[in-house]
Amino acid sequence: MTILAYSARLAPFQPETTWTLEGAELVERRGPRERRFALNALTAFRLARPREGGRRRVLTLAFGRRRTVLTAQSYVGPGRFDDRLAAFSLFVHAVAAVAADQSPSGKNGGARFERAGALAPREGLTWVMGLLAAGTAVMLLLAFTPGMAGAAVAIAARMAFVLILLAAVLPWLGRGEGLDPHALPDDLLPLS
């Protein structure tokens, strides 16, 4: 069995993170900690690069609620990064091919392979909706304090209305540009 590996340091005070592709599993090792991700459970494969170009790339893999992030640059020191785009591209091509073969197919099943833009409006709106829902719940809890019932319920009702409007907009926001996992674009992942 061939084991393909890629490593990068993600933050200043962390040891280098190593990702290995062992059969149909992606293994992430950071110091003594190890996490395993079965590629047949992959739900999202999102590859991003900055709009202005450059060699920075980020791959976000989602496995339900669990996520792992791979970067093409490794932290060296303050303001200095080691460019590892060639090794990153090779590893991402291998992960995409195995994940595409392992993930179940179908309309609602399987992984979404997409190119993320610099601004992800759907995810941002989802976070805003979550925070707004939490604020609405807090306002409803404040309604139980003496003298705040009327004001708290009125504010919570307005916040819930805005939450409903945002939920109505959510289906029209795009998820990102789709990618063919077996033919990833060379401008995004150059192999040389």
Image (cartoon, rainbow, N blue to C red):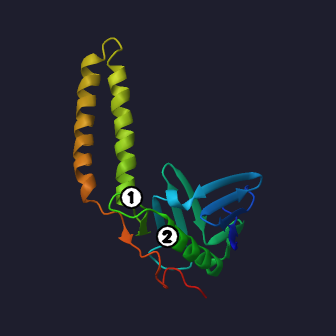
**Could you tell me if residue 118 is visible in this image?**
no
Q: Residue at x 36, y 21 (%)?
A: 142
Name the residue nearer the viewer: 82 or 146.
Answer: 82
**Up-down relation of residue 143 to residue 28 (above or below):** above
The label number, if any, that marks residue 173 in the structure image: none
Residue 190: name its quadrant.
bottom right
Instruction: Please state the horizontal and vertical placement of residue 103, each as a whole percent of the image.
Output: 47, 63
Instruction: Describe residue 124's horizontal placement relative to residue 19 as left or right.
Output: left
Q: Residue furthest right?
A: 32
**Up-down relation of residue 115 to residue 175 (above or below):** below
Q: Residue at x 37, y 46 (%)?
A: 128
* Amino acid identity at mark 2: Asp
The label number, if any, that marks residue 101 in the structure image: 2
Which residue is label 1 attached to?
A: 109
Task: Tell me if mark 2 has few (under 14), some (14-19) or many (20+) residues whose alpha carbon lies within 10 angstroms of its own.
Answer: some
Quadrant occupied by the C terminus: bottom right
Q: Residue at x 50, y 48 (%)?
A: 65
Name the residue nearer the viewer: 151 or 126.
Answer: 126
Instruction: Please state the horizontal and vertical placement of residue 26, each as a whole percent of the image.
Output: 62, 62
Please tell me whether mark 2 sits on a helix, a strand or a loop: helix
